[in-house]
Each structure stands twice: as C-alpha cells, then as structure tokens.
Amino acid sequence: MERQRARALGRDSKAPRRKGLSPAPPSGPHEPGEKRPKLHLNIRTLTDDMLDKFASIRIPGSKKERPPLPNLKHLSGSSDHSSAFSETRENIPKPLSENEVLKLFENMMEDMNLNEDKKAPLREKDFSIKKEMVMQYINTASKTGSLRSSRQISPQEFIHELKMGYTDDRLFTYLESLRVSLTSNPVSWVQSFGHEGLGLLLDILEKLINGQIQERVVKKSQHKVIQCLKALMNTQYGLERIMSEERSLSLLAKAMDPKQPSMMADVVKLLSAMCIVGEESILEEVLEALTSAGEERKIDRFFPIVEGLRHNSVQLQVACMQLINALVTSPDDLDFRLHIRNEFMRCGLKEILPNLKCIKNDVLDIQLKVFEEHKEEDLIELSHRLEDIRRTEASDVYNLVWDTVKQTRAEGYFLSILQHLLLIRNDHFIRQQYFKLIDECVSQIVLHRDGMDPDFTYRKRLDLDLSQFVDVCIDQGKLEEYEEKASELCQKFEKEFTDHQETQAQLQKKEAKINELQAELQAFKSQFGALPPGTTICLQSSVEGETSPSALPPAPPALLPPPPPLGFLSGQSFPPLNLPFGLKPKKEFKPEISMRRLNWLKIGPNEMSENCFWVKVNENKYENTDLLCKLENTFCCQQKVKMNTNDFEEKKVIKKRIKELKFLDPKIAQNLSIFLSSFRVPYEEIKMMILEVDETQLSESLIQNLLKHLPDEEQLNSLSQFKSDYNNLCEPEQFAVKMSNVKRLRPRLSAILFKLQFEEQVNTIKPDIMAVSTACEEIKKSKSFSKLLELVLLMGNYMNAGSRNAQTFGFDLSSLCKLKDIKSADQKTTLLHFLVDICEEKYPDILPFVDDFAHLDKACRVSVEVLEKNLKQMGRQLQQLEKNLETFPPPEDLHDKFVIKIFVSSANEQYANLSELLDNMTQLYQSVMAYYAVDMKKVSVEDFFNDLNNFRTTFMQALKENIKKREAAENDKRARIAKERAEQERLQRQLEKKRLLEMKTEADETGVMDSLLEALQSGAAFRDRRKRTPKPKDIRQSLSPMSQRPVLKVCNHDTYSGCGFAFPVHNTFCNTTLHGLTECLIYNHGIPHSIDRDQGTQFIARQV
C-alpha cells in the first residue's frame, strides 16, 4: 500500500523509461525566442494538414522532473474537470457512441486551448477522422503518463498543501512542483487551480514579504511564488485573473528587491507586461502600487527600479528598462509622460544612462534606443505645443501665472521672484540688460534640449550658457554707435529734403515769372509788331540776366478749360450719351439677389478734369466670378435686426464767468506788484537788460509779463515827473518810473519778443508745411492705393446694381470710411474686413499702401488755415519791425544797443522761403484734391487728410483682426484635430494591446506571458504607440531664446520671450503646455504621487 502511494506521489524513481519517449525538457521558463518542445503524433491515417494542426501538444514533465511532495495526503472525493476527462479516458476499451466521440472531440480541442478559428475546420472533418484523432490523443497522453500524474496530483491536492502554512523547505518543494504543473498541464488544469489557488499564492507571498525573517529559504520561496504567478499568467485566464486581483500589483511592487536580482527581474517583467496590455486604469494602479511601496519603505517610489539599473546583472538592467519604457510610453497625455520621465531622471536615471550605454548588450541597447526615441518624440510634440503661445499682453500672462500658482506651494517662490525684480536698478538702459539676462536664465532653466526638468537638489551655481547673450552685449556698443549715425543721417536727410522743397518752390516761382514775362512779350509783339533785331537781343539778354544760369525747361502748354456742365443729364441714373475725356459707360451688373448698398458720394463726369484719377481708372481687371459670388453671398440683404442704441445726453456747456478787466491805476499797481514779487531782480538791472538786449537773461515770459502789466505810454510819460520824489513812491510806481527812462519801451519790447520767438515759429511752421507737402506726394504717387480704389469701385458698382449709385465713374474718398459700417448678412463681418481679406488672399500688392502714407498721420494734425494765419502774422510783425526801425530815434544812452537790422534781413529771407514753401504746399494739395476730384469748396484739406488717415487706421485694425480671427480658427482646428488624433491613438492602443495578447505561436495558445515578454524584449511592444512627428532640423535653434524674437512673430509675431521661443504673436497661448509644466512642478513639491493626476491639476484646468 505504501509502495503504491509512493509511486502515486512520484517517489518511484525506478519506473521504466518508455521506448520512443524522449527526455522531457527542463521545466523552467523558456528563453525568449526559443520554441517550446512539441510532441509529434504518430498518426499514419491522418493527412499532412491534420498533422500540422496537432504539430505541438504540451508535454508534461516526467516523474523525475517534478520534485516529490512529502507527506502529501490522498484526498478522496476530489473531482474536477480534468479528473472527469481522465476517468472518461479510462473507459477506452468500451465501445463509444457517436455522441460520446463528438463530446470527447470537443473536450480534446478545449483541453488543447484551441480558439474558434482553429476549431471550425476540425469540426468539418469526417466522423472517422475525428474518432481516430481522439483515440490517438488519448493513447499519446497515456503513454507519457500525464493522465496518471494529473489524476494523482490534482489541483485540489496542491491547494490543500498550500493551506498547511509551511514556510520551510517543504513550501519551496511544493511551489517548485506547482510551477512545473502550471507549466506542463493543460489550460483546464490551470483554470481549476486558479479559482482558489491564486488567492493562496498571494497570501503566501504577502506572508513572506511582511515577515521579519530574512532567511535564504524564505527569499527562495518568495521567488518560487513569483515564478508560479508567472506560469499562471502564461495563460490568458491567469493573466486576467491576476490583473483583476486588487492586491496582486501591490504585492509585486513590494517584492521588488535589488538585492535579489533574479526575483526582481521576474517581478518587473510581470509589471511591464501588465502595463502594456492592461486597460488605462492598470497603469494608474501600477503607479499607485509603486507609490504605496515607496511610502511604506520611506523612499522614492521609483528608487528600487533605478537601483536595479545600478546592479551588475544585465538581465535585471534589461528588465528595469523595460518597466521604465512601459511606464513612460503608456500614458496618452504628453504632460503625464513628461512627468513620469522627469521623475525617473531625478531619481538618478540621468546619471546612470551614460554608464548603461557603455554596456555592450543588444537587448539592453534596444531598450535604451526605445527610451531615447520616445523622449525625442515627446520633446518635439512639446515644442509644437509651445509654438501656439500667443499671449502678448503682460497683464494676461501675469493673471494666468498667478491663477496657476496661487494657493499652492509655488506661490511663495513666485512672490520672491517678483520682489527680486523690484530690486533692479532704476536705469533705462541697465534695466533692459537685467531683464535680458533674466530672460535668458529662465529660458535655459525651463526649456531644456532634452525636454526634462533640471535637478532640483542641485544647490551650486547653475550651469547656464550665456555665450550668446554675451555676444549680444558686446554688439550693444556698436548698435548704439550705428543708431547715433542713423539719427545724424536722418537729420541730414530732413535738411536736404527741406532744401530741395525750398529749391522747388523757388524754381516754380521763377518759372511763373518767366511765363509772365513771355506773355507780356507776346502781347507787346502783337500790339506793336516785330521789334528791331537789336531790341530783341537786348530783351533776351535782360531776361537771361534775371533767370538763373541753368537752362530752364520750357513752360508746359496751357490746360484746356473744363467742359461745360451737362445740364439735366448729370442727375440721371443712366450714363450720359457723350462722355468727356474718352470715358466709357460703366458695366451694368445684375446680381441674382438683392444686396446691401454702399452709399458713397458719387462723382459725375462733369466734376472731373482731364488728368483726374477717375478718368484713368480701370477696375474691370479685378472682376472675377469668385470675387463677385463671394461678395454677393456675404452682403446679401436680410431682415434688419434691431440694434440697441445708447442714449447720449447732451453735455451742458457751462460758461465760466469772465470778470471784466478794468485798467485802473490801482489794478495796474497790483499787477505790477505781483509780477515784481515773482521776478526779484533790481529795477536798474531790468532796465539795462532791455537796453542792451541781453538775450542770455531776457526770456519770453519776462518780456510778455512786461508788455502785459506795464502802463501805457501816456501813463509812463506822466510818471517821469515823479523822479524827484522817487523814494516816496510805492514799488510798482518806482519800477514804472525806472522804465519810463527807456524811449519807446513798448515797441522795443515787442521787437525783442519777436526776435526771441522767431526761430521757434520757423521751426514750428516749416515741419508742418513739409508734412503736408510730403503727404500730398505720397497720396498721389501711391500705386497700391490706386489699385485699392479700383477694387472698391468694382465692388461698390456690383453692390449698388439697380440703384441710383450704380455704374459710378468715381466716388468721394470720404466714402472709404463707410466700408466698416456695412455688415454682412450674418452680421459677423464688415465690408472693410471682406476687402482686407480679398487683398490678403488675391491682391497682396495693395496692402503696402498703409506704409506709403508715412506722413499722413502728421499731416492730418496740421491746419492749413492756421499755417496761413501764422505766416501772415509773421509778415505783419516783420513789417511793423521794419517801420519801427525806420522811426526809431538815435540812442542817447551808451548802453542802448537796440540794433537788430541784421536780424530783420535774415528774418525776411526766412519768411520768403516759408512763403514759397506754403505756396508750393498749396499747389500740391490743390493738385492732389483735383486729382481725386474732391470739391475744395465742400471739403477742407484737414477733412481730406483726416478721412484718409481714419481709413488707413481702420484698414490696419481690420487687418490685425482678420489675422487674429484666422489664428483662432486655426487653433480651434488644431485642437479639434488633436482631439480626434488622441481618440484614434487611444483606440489604436487598445487594438495594439489586443494584438499583443494574440502574439503566440501558431498552434500553442498558452504562451501569453512568454509572447508579451518577447515583445518587450524586442521593442515591438513600444512601436507605433504614438504617431511620430517629423523632427525639425534644429530643435535647439528653435528653443533658443536669443535666436529669434517675435514681433510676438512676438510672444513673437509676437515672440513669447518668457518661454524663450521665437513664435509669430501669435495672439494665441497654448494653455495646455503651461498646464503640463506646472503640473510637473506640483508633483515634485510634496503632493503625494498616488494622487489622481486630474485632481492634482484640477485647479489649473479650471483656469485654462
């Protein structure tokens, strides 16, 4: 009896070896890429294709391979699926019915773990073939002894022994035998054991981990439990069961011990496999398990993994890199991937990577290559995100940063940064240099070429590359020198340009005089006939003497007088029959639908001259079907929407009461007293300054106050008789007595004041004249502006088709300002924005007209009427000064130096130049207004310039709004595409996980874990996990804050200098990037790693 029991338990080592049975392979786990041993069935009656179907049958280990189970008690009454199938096979000699054969056939396929795709062709075979297959399968299995062994050591027997609670060598023996059974038995046996046995294995593992005993046998038993779990997970049933157990991941994380490299290698491999095939929640559970294990040991959660890389075992290093790649590449969110990778780097991976690259191992090189490739891809994706940053307003950026850091641990550091910025020296140039240096430092700290956070534990000086910044500072001196030279050249240009205008004015004046003399000569000839030859020569020489030596061009022919009015025809809506200047009737448009009207001021042919712009205009060249259809669809008529109007209250004009001034002696005395108290200079010195005309001490305010407060000439003359009683007079009277000694005091003071103010008046009048003259030339010569008017004329005639303003030859330029008031049918755009969009899309050569009108802004602030008034006043003052000089008495006092005849001569010359410039300016603005058929009786020069400048301003504003609108649309489109791509990637990842589960050998359906580990080792598990983005040619250059600044293209159309990126300002900011970078900092400053990532950044997400 004992002998039979020992034989049943596998203790009989003398069992004869069956002939033809090869030795069983080792029961340990197979090396990756190594094929499993296959059992070739010797069935002569089966066809070749049937042999292929059963090319591999799992061979259980022989009795020699399975260690004996000491004290294993026989369990009566235990039955399961496999024992039932074995009992059925014991009754083979009995004849089987057809139903029994078919049932056994199904059990055979199920026991072989065939899927439905492989079962289907087998079910279509003949019944005889099915019966022969069943018999051959049973005979083969019985010859190997698997039936007997599986019956003798059933899953229930292993479960019973595991419940005994052994922790010594007996447990190790049981676990080794269990591992062999899990590896060699069919799936049905594994399923039968897994229902209860998995929980027992986890209990044993937890007991071994939490126990204080560190004996070698305990560690060996712990490793055997891990191997049993690995064997169980080698089936899909076992993998799903373990992943569904809540404590399995936690126990595996706690089992990681770098001191046990073999066991840790198995543990990290299992965790890696679960990361790449599990649902998205599995990754979070794995991270939470690692976090709990780290908190329990009071170490960083990734510390054991990084320590495993420091070990000399290449197998452990490969396994740890597999787990790192699985953790880093699994998240769909870029921010989370960056966070995981940066945390590994801070744990010491950054220092270990160079050493790992020196190890010559192909499998390790694959894992390192996967790590670097995914790191580069994430960096590129991050750089693409940052290109969307378009925040240009400092207040917006500050508010966003403040909302990001407030009520977090980063708030104190942010406040400290701002306080340090307040300590920058208050110097305009130095402050700029400080902020440049700070910008460079922040850029290099925040944005790394490897896309990873810096080492926050580093307390020494930061290693910053300031070479590029130093080069900029070196060139700063040269830049200032060049700016100074440019300023000097600009002043010289302005002077030369002014002289040129003056020369032109003089030339025109001389030409006018020549024309006048020629007209007189012709009149003289017609009246008196031909002159004698000598007289003609004398007259010609006299004319040549008056003109300049240079040859003057002949006078232009006289212009034809304008045509007479066309009478009642000018008021009709249809074109006149006889058009002047070769004008052709305008094309009559007939839109299919009614359109909004452009209520411009129409200019008729009778209001034009031969050289008028509207005579030469050709707007038909811009006509095309696309433009007109787009215009028609955008500005079709629809029901008017009532707009809310704001009521404006009339401002009440409050007139200040002006008290009537009375020039009485007490009042004059009071005014003089106030003046003298503010100007504390002895009266005699004031008198001498006036006599000597001391411009170093005389000021405009002094002269103006004297003219204002001194008594008139009669009162001054009457005060001269009080000279003898000078000391008894009050101070105002004493001052008046002193001033009465100066002859013709008021004319003298007026002349001095005019001399002091003359240079200022010239410098005020001349630039205004030049601005108007230059603006007139710019408006008339601008080709892009002419093209713009042609395009507007075409659009207006098309929109006004069928109305009184249709078929217009020209329009008043003030109508350009009305374009912004015409709304589209959907009320979302205006005709001005539509015009800007058309110019950008099809006619970009029109856009430069805003730059052509460089002097228009200054010219619109000039009043021609005030210019003429000031110049006339200057002429009257000069005439009065000359008259005063003629009647001025000879000086009686030696100190009287009132001699300004030289000044009068120079002033007259400058006044003449100004008059010529004003005449030239008048001709220019009259010419340009006539060129555009502007009625100067109705429209002033100021209004003409203001209308054009307002249109120019609104055009540029519309251009900016269109750019901003397009950028917003592009950002929305990119966000939508990114969302769709992320969803597609998520679905693709799920399909990839399913594909990994199906990566098995052709006929062996049980090597799930082996296939996953093979995919991890070869890098196939990490391929195509995300769509690769084309790598820029030079990422570092795009990240350099000094390489390019936005004009933000700010931050850079505008450039985002805070991040150091050169982007177009673009006005759009990538909120997600700031969210992600801030999230990394939040994780790194004390918030538990186990917290939900969405909870950790929930506040930031609300702000974004």
Image (cartoon, grey):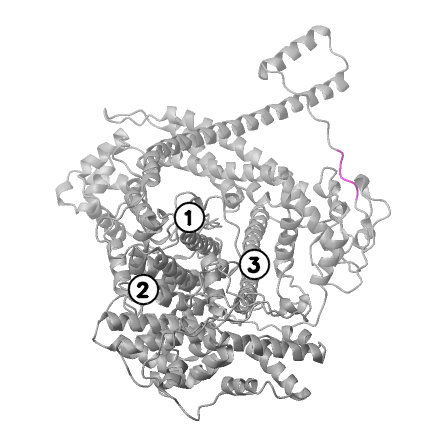
Label 3: few (<14), some (14–19) or many (≥20) C-alpha neighbours in 10 Å: few
Quarter of the image for residue 108 reads: bottom right
Is residue 249 visible to us here? no
Q: Nearer the viewer, residue 747 or 642?
A: 642
Residue labelled with disc 3: 970
> At x 23% / y 42%, what residue is drawn?
736
Residue labelled with disc 2: 302
Q: Which is more foreground, mark 3 or mark 2? A: 2
Residue 181 position, x and y percent, is 43, 76
Farthest left residue in view: 727
> At x 77% / y 15%, what residue is drawn?
529
Residue labelled with disc 1: 1039
Give the CA distance from mark 3 to mark 2. 40 Å
Label 1: few (<14), some (14–19) or many (≥20) C-alpha neighbours in 10 Å: many
Q: Is residue 301 above or below residue 467?
A: below
Farthest right residue in view: 577
Look at the image and give the residue range highlighted in magenta.
560-564
Q: Is residue 947 above or below residue 200?
A: above
Quarter of the image for residue 413 reads: bottom left
> At x 31% / y 75%, what residue is drawn?
172
